[in-house]
Amino acid sequence: MTTDKTYETITCTIDRHRARIVLNRPDKRNAINQLMQDELADALWTADDDTQVHCVILSGSGSDFSSGYDMGQYEGANPGAQNRHRGRKSFDDDAWRLEKAQRCRMALFDMHKPVIAQVHGRCLAGGTDLALMCDIVICADDARFGFPPARAQGSLPSHMWLYHLGPQWAKRMLLTGDAMGGKDAAALGLALKSVPADQLAAEVDALADRLAMIDTDLLSANKRIVNIGLELMGARTIQRMAAEMDARGHLAESRETFRKNVMEKGMKEAIRLRDGAFGDDLIRR
């Protein structure tokens, strides 16, 4: 059944003790804007409050999980404050806005019930910020994980890569913006498991079936003790630092070059100029 709420950028249905939340901007490859983050947070907390729901499955419509953030909302003009609201001109304004968006994503980490990310196609940039905040990631063999904006535009506004991959692989990914396929993601710990694309939904549902047999109080207790362990290892603090580090990265000359290319040549050409020299950027171990 559908929920009693209507959203513009996501859909949410509840059946068999699971909430299925789908990123639903397929024409934009599920590019994430602020409205999507707000709606996602609302749907997650609504599912967490529903006594019939044991877990959430987060997926994307169309060809991809998510191609990243909707850069059109960030890479255009860089206004100062208007109508008494913050702009994006100062370092603090930038960090404040990044932290605001991050609070929406932290619902995945903070809510009591487990969330499974069902990842197919591209899971890039902001898509990874969502998927890696989930409790379990199951992906298609041909999924593609990466953060290409790290090549020119800034750092990562959320950061769970270190905890999934360890320091060397996290650096390998983030220092180059290169991508990792689904099979390697599972082998290295970025995902729990990788399966053929046509088996992905069934694999995720099979896990959700098992979670549906567990008392939600126990699901909560066991999710939260692991996440408290991550907090003791600095996971919450590093999220706050990630937002500030991204604001710092936005001061890089390459970010300004990218922004000017967007304004003068359009987003598609700016991305081509950013990524063209890297060629086939899929990591092969």
Image: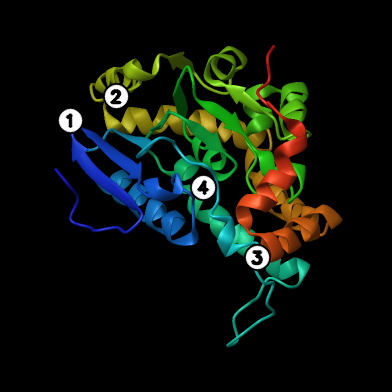
For label 3, the SS is helix
Give the Cα separation between the discs numbered 1 and 3.
39 Å
- 80 shown above or below 168: below
What amino acid is at disc 4? Answer: Met
Q: Nearer the viewer, residue 231 or 203?
A: 203
Q: The residue under label 2 is which amino acid type?
A: Ala
Circle 1 — which element?
loop
x%, y% of residue 232?
Answer: 65, 35
What type is the residue that disc 3 sits on?
Trp
Which residue was labeled with disc 4? 106
Mark 3 or mark 1, which is nearer the start of the sequence? 1
**Quarter occupied by residue 168:** top right
Mark 2 nearby-residue class (10 Å; few <14, some 14–19, many ≥20): many
Question: Which numbered marker is on residue 252?
Answer: none
* Residue denoted by label 1: 16
Q: From the top left corner, tell me how far across and down residue 82 is, in percent.
A: 61, 85
